[in-house]
Image (tube, rainbow, N blue to C red):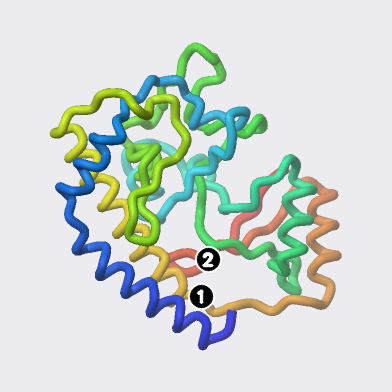
Amino acid sequence: MNITLRRLLIRELEEELEAAKKIDAERLAEEIQRTGFNCLMCGKCCRREFGDNRVALMPEEISRIHDGSSLTLEDIAEPFNIEAESPEEEYLLQKETDMVDEEGNIHTFGWMLQRKKNRDCIFIPDERTDNRCSIYELRPHLCSTYPFYMEGLKLRISECEGLGKVIGLQESRELAGKVLNRYVCELQDTILTYKNYNGFITGGKGQLIAELNLKQGYLNYIVHNSEGTCKITKRI
C-alpha cells in the first residue's frame, strides 16, 4: 500500500466517522424494530458448519476479555486470516495475495477470536445442545450486536433465524446504541491501523521459509492493528 493510497483511505474513513457520529439512533432503533429480532440461542453464528463464523476483534476488546478473565492473548485471539479449509490452503491464499515478507512472516490486519480445530468458536461448548458462551458478559461488539451491523452509513443485516421475531422499542433502542457504538469504534480502530501501518518487504526466500515453517507445524504472523504491530507464532 503506497502512501498516497493510505492517505486517501484514511481521509475517506475520517469523513465516514464524522458522518457516523451524526446518525439518528432513534431512527435506527425504529428500523431494527420493524425488522424484528429475537436470539433463539441456536448457536449457529458460533459454529463453522453453518457458515463463516470469524469474529473480528479490536485491541480494546481483547484487553476487556483479558482483564475480566485469566485468559492470555493466545487464549483469546489469533491473526485475522482468509477463510480456508486447511492451514495449507490458508497459506496458499496469503501467498497469492503477496502477504508474505522476505523473512517468511505472513502479514495480516487485525485479530479475530480463537477457534477450535473444528473451527467452532473457542468459547462455545462442544456439546451441541449447549450454546451458552463462556465469556458472554465480555463478548465482543460483533457478538452483542449480531445479526446487525453498520456499513457505508447504512444498517446491514446478516443471516439469522431470529430475524422477524417481535422486539420491543426499548430493546431496539439498546441494540441500536450498541450497533452505533460498534460502528464508531471500528472506524476509529481502522483509521489508527492505517496510520500505524509502515508496510513490509516481499521477495527473497520469504515464501520458501514460510513453507518450511508450515511443514514443521507453525506459521509466523505479523499482525497490523491500531496499537502497532505484533509478531505471533500460530501452531498448526
Mark 1 or mark 2: whose residue is earlier in sequence: 1
Amino acid type, label 1? Tyr
> Would you say the residues marked 1 and 2 are in contact, meaning their CB atoms lie under 8 Å apart?
yes
On screen, residue 72 versus residue 119, left or right, reads: left
Residue under pointer 1: 197
Q: Viewer-proximal residue, 156 or 44?
A: 156
At 74% across and 71% down in the image, what residue appears? 103
Depth check, front residue: 1 or 203:
1
Q: CA distance from mark 1 to mark 2?
A: 7 Å
Where is residue 39? Give x, y as percent.
Answer: 35, 25
Observer able to see residue 66? no
Report whether residue 37 is seen: yes
The residue shown at (54%, 79%) is 198
Indicate the position of residue 141 as horizontal and vertical percent values: 35, 45
Q: Is the residue marked by circle 1 packed among few (<14), some (14-19), or many (20+) residues within 10 Å?
A: some
| Observer-nearest of 226 and 12 | 12
* Element assignment for label 2: strand
Residue 79 placement (x, y as % from top left): 57, 53
Image location of residue 14, percent across then percent down: 33, 74
> What secondary structure is found at the residue carrying circle 1?
loop
* Residue at the spot of label 2: 224
